[in-house]
């Protein structure tokens, strides 16, 4: 009887965790569409005003293949991770000042700021899906 309860609890927890992740990705997709899609795509090599964000997590900054319009990230010496992406989409100018030792430039055309932490996390989770 005790084993059955443990298994049932484990399954319920797994379903809840999966549902939470799916909800975050869904929210991230909506936020991406509303806040980012005007200037960025998630398609490989399909650039807009800004570079494609397909595979951005784990990619060296300023190296989206085929995108040549970099200002702030041309020659950057860091790899995008969740922390740096969160900092970037919170406030690009503060990011550039705080990381001037590893970024290529000091200006950017990007002006979207995602103020809520939960929204930033949802967008980054969505970016990690690459869809």
Image (cartoon, rainbow, N blue to C red):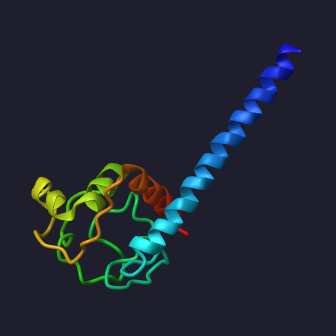
Closer to the camera, 43 or 8?
8
Q: Position of residue 13 (x, y in %)?
A: 69, 34
Residue in view at x 43 percent, y 77 percent: 37
Instruction: Farthest residue to the front: give it.
Output: 116
**How many labels, in total?**
0
Q: Position of residue 21 (x, y in %)?
A: 59, 49
Residue in view at x 43 percent, y 57 percent: 124
**Quarter of the view holding residue 63:** bottom left
Dividing the image into 4 quarters, which one contains the N terminus? Answer: top right
**Quarter of the view holding residue 131:** bottom right
Q: Position of residue 80 (x, y in %)?
A: 32, 58
Q: Position of residue 113 (x, y in %)?
A: 28, 64
Closer to the camera, 41 or 119?
119
Q: Is residue 112 above or below residue 69?
A: above
Instruction: Farthest residue to the right: give it.
Output: 1
Residue in view at x 32 percent, y 54 percent: 86
Evaluate whether residue 16 shows in this view.
Answer: yes
Determine whether, in the image, residue 74 is placed left or right of residue 27: left
Instruction: Farthest residue to the top: give it.
Output: 2
Q: Is residue 111 above or below residue 18?
A: below
Residue in view at x 36 percent, y 62 percent: 59
Determine whether, in the image, residue 92 is placed left or right of residue 19: left
Determine whether, in the image, residue 48 is placed left or right of residue 18: left
Evaluate whether residue 54 shows in this view.
Answer: no
């Amino acid at each position: 009887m005790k084993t059955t309860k443990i298994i049932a609890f484990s399954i319920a927890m797994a379903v809840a965790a999966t549902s939470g992740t799916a909800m975050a990705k869904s929210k991230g997709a909506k936020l991406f569409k509303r806040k980012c899609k005007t200037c960025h795509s998630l398609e490989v090599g399909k650039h807009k005003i800004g570079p494609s964000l397909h595979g951005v997590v784990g990619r060296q900054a300023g190296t989206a293949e085929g995108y040549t319009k970099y200002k702030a990230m041309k020659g950057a010496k860091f790899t995008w991770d969740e922390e740096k992406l969160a900092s970037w989409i919170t406030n690009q100018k503060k990011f550039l000042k705080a990381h001037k030792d590893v970024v290529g430039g000091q200006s950017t055309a990007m002006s979207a700021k995602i103020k809520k932490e939960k929204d930033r996390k949802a967008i980054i989770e969505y970016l990690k899906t690459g869809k």
